[in-house]
Image (spheres, rainbow, N blue to C red):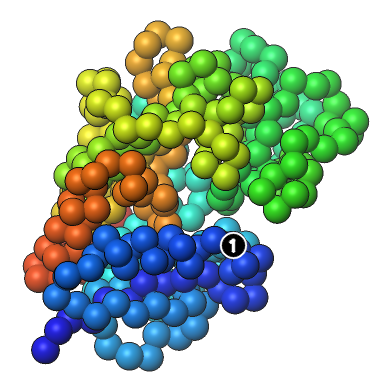
């Protein structure tokens, strides 16, 4: 009997459901063509009532619109074969996970976490970082939402930044947020994304923002190309993957930027619904499919079997 894979998709009640995710899902179906499994999909917000050999939150866009609901939905899947496992996904929802990586010695962009972005917090961060240009972003966010470069004086004078994908003005984060120094290499070189499938390195993509922008997502017309990952970038990504445990990840995207000392700083570790850039490397889809084959046929991808690895936060 063929196996059954369930891919989780956006909540129909959220704006992300009106986006281009069906094309992304089609792309994954195409990459998995020929696998010995039927592929199903349903919104992450619906209860999973049937049995599946593997459940993946790979297209769970919009989780950041209702992070508590999403975490609860993932927690309800505990005990099923979910990859990436619910406890890792739930940890990855809130960017304060970066503190855990930093504590473990993984180099991140210097970051101050605040309950609210205030003029005082901004002034303190400028003193700490020794520079005027800061990046403000919510701790729960996706697709550069409410993320902006701030060089101004008082946030009360803020009138709105560049429009985001949904054509709203990018506004400063309202709740818990992170404040980071703006990294000039984002504009000059771009952001590196290193992709891993089943814990093994697959390919690296350099995403360079269009002129005058700092956002490296394809949604903002950035230029993406597959390149050999610099050795220092690879070492940083490996350290981040090893922190979680290679046997605990079906897919991962590690985003980083070059620092002024030519080393790299981790920006984010995307373990929920990252764009895996399969179309940029002719062999990436094959490695992706192989990882799924392995996950279907190897026991022990649920969180319970790896209590020795990453702990709950």
Rendering coords of residue 153 (x, y %): 83, 21
Q: In this view, does 93 lie above or below 55?
A: above
Rendering coords of residue 188 (x, y %): 51, 16
- Depth check: 127 or 253 in front? 253
Report helix, strand or loop for mark 1. Answer: loop
In the image, 61: left or right of 149? left
Q: Quadrant of the N terminus?
A: bottom left
Disc 1 crowd rating (10 Å Cα; few below 14, some 14-19, many 20+) is: some
Q: Can residue 14 be seen in this view?
A: yes
Q: Is residue 310 above or below residue 236?
A: below
Q: Identify the residue under disc 1.
A: 19
* Residue 41 placement: quadrant: bottom left
Q: In this view, does 65 lie above or below 165?
A: below
Rendering coords of residue 219 (x, y %): 57, 45
Rendering coords of residue 115 (x, y %): 67, 44
In the picture as drawn, the residue positioned furthest to the right comes out as 157
Residue at 37 percent of width and 26 percent of height:
107
Residue at 62 percent of width and 10 percent of height:
130
Q: Can residue 85 be seen in this view?
A: no
Q: Quadrant of the C terminus?
A: bottom left
Residue at 49 percent of width and 77 percent of height:
43
- Depth check: 19 or 177 in front? 19
Residue at 27 percent of width and 21 percent of height:
230
In the image, 79: left or right of 27? left
In the image, 74: left or right of 55? right
* Residue 206 placement: quadrant: top left
């Amino acid at each position: 009997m063929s196996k059954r894979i369930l891919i989780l998709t956006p909540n129909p009640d959220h704006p992300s459901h009106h986006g281009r995710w069906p094309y992304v899902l089609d792309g994954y179906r195409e990459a998995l063509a020929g696998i010995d499994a039927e592929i199903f999909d349903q919104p992450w917000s619906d209860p999973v009532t049937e049995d599946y050999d593997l459940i993946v939150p790979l297209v769970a866009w919009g989780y950041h619109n209702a992070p508590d609901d999403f975490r609860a939905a993932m927690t309800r899947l505990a005990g099923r074969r979910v990859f990436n496992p619910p406890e890792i996904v739930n940890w990855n929802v809130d960017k304060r996970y970066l503190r855990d990586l930093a504590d473990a010695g993984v180099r991140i962009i210097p970051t101050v976490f605040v309950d609210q972005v205030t003029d005082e917090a901004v002034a303190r961060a400028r003193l700490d970082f020794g520079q005027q240009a800061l990046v403000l972003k919510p701790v729960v966010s996706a697709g550069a939402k409410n993320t902006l470069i701030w060089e101004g004086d008082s946030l009360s004078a803020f009138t709105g930044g560049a429009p985001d994908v949904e054509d709203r003005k990018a506004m400063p984060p309202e709740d818990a947020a992170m404040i980071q120094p703006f990294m000039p290499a984002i504009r000059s070189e771009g952001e590196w994304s290193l992709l891993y499938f089943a814990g093994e390195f697959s390919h690296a993509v350099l995403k360079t923002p269009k002129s005058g922008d700092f956002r490296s997502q394809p949604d903002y017309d950035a230029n993406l190309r597959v390149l050999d990952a610099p050795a220092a970038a690879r070492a940083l990504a490996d350290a981040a993957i090893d922190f979680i445990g290679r046997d605990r990840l079906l897919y991962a995207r590690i985003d980083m930027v070059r620092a002024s000392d030519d080393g790299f700083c981790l920006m984010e570790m995307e373990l929920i619904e990252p764009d895996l850039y399969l179309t940029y490397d002719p062999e990436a889809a094959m490695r992706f499919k192989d990882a799924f084959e392995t996950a279907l046929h190897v026991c022990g991808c649920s969180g319970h079997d790896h209590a020795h690895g990453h702990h709950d936060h």
